[in-house]
Amino acid sequence: MHIRQADPADYPYVIGVVDQWWGGRQMAAMLPKLFFVHFRDTSFVAEEDGAIAGFLCGFRSQTFDDEAYIHFVGIDPERRGAGIARSLYERFFEAVAPRTIVRAVTSPVNEHSVAFHRALGFEAELSDDNYDGRGEARVLLVKRLA
Ligand SMILES: CC(C)(COP(=O)(O)OP(=O)(O)OC[C@H]1O[C@@H](n2cnc3c(N)ncnc32)[C@H](O)[C@@H]1OP(=O)(O)O)[C@@H](O)C(=O)NCCC(=O)NCCS
């Protein structure tokens, strides 16, 4: 497994599989190409056997100079449980150093995502019930890097 920076050429493949990788949830609209253009040095692709096995899109906060944010992480369902997402997160943590606070937001229905983040040492807190103005709560995740 090889991790490298994301590239605009990765986008067509990723956007074509993202809904399927999220179990049929409609996620593609939340992942615009701009992550593969303007956030390349903090977005990564994992390759295995010449294929994209997973990806992570994140960025350094423009507002808080000690924080970074992970927007999306997805792993090919055939390749889960092998540490690929953990490796992508570790690569991201290195990329954003010396920033020490990493945040992410996930849906309460995505229990796998919450469990994954807890396994990586994130703390989870439920937001109010109108986080994005659409009448839904979110799970707010934060990890403080040593
Ligand atoms: C969540 C997801 C990214 C995990 O990817 P993965 O490559 O299988 O995860 P890893 O193998 O790196 O697992 C890292 C740790 O998380 C834990 N973990 C991963 N998935 C888990 C699950 N479904 N339930 C409980 N723990 C889980 C692993 O046990 C592991 O812990 P350990 O290192 O202490 O043994 C993957 O299941 C996925 O792509 N899901 C659909 C997309 C999604 O929901 N993304 C997150 C929201 S943006």
Image (cartoon, rainbow, N blue to C red):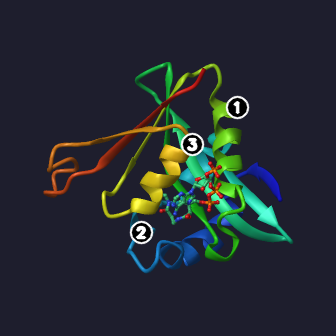
The amino acid sitting under disc 3 is Leu
The secondary structure type at the circle numbered 2 is: loop
Q: Which mark is residue 27?
A: 2
The residue positioned 50% from the left and 19% from the top of the image is 66
**Above or below, 116 relative to 80:** above
Q: CA distance from mark 3 to mark 1?
A: 15 Å
Residue at the disc numbered 3: 120
Q: In the picture provided, is 5 more to the left or to the right than 2? A: left
Q: Which mark is residue 82?
A: none
**Above or below, 66 relative to 75:** above
The residue positioned 55% from the left and 22% from the top of the image is 100
Residue at the disc numbered 1: 94
Q: In the picture provided, is 103 more to the left or to the right than 35? A: left
Report crowding for label 3: few under 14, some 14 to 19, many 20 or more residues within 10 A (C-alpha).
some
The residue positioned 46% from the left and 61% from the top of the image is 112
Image x and y of residue 58, in percent: 55, 44
Q: In the picture provided, is 3 more to the left or to the right than 99? A: right
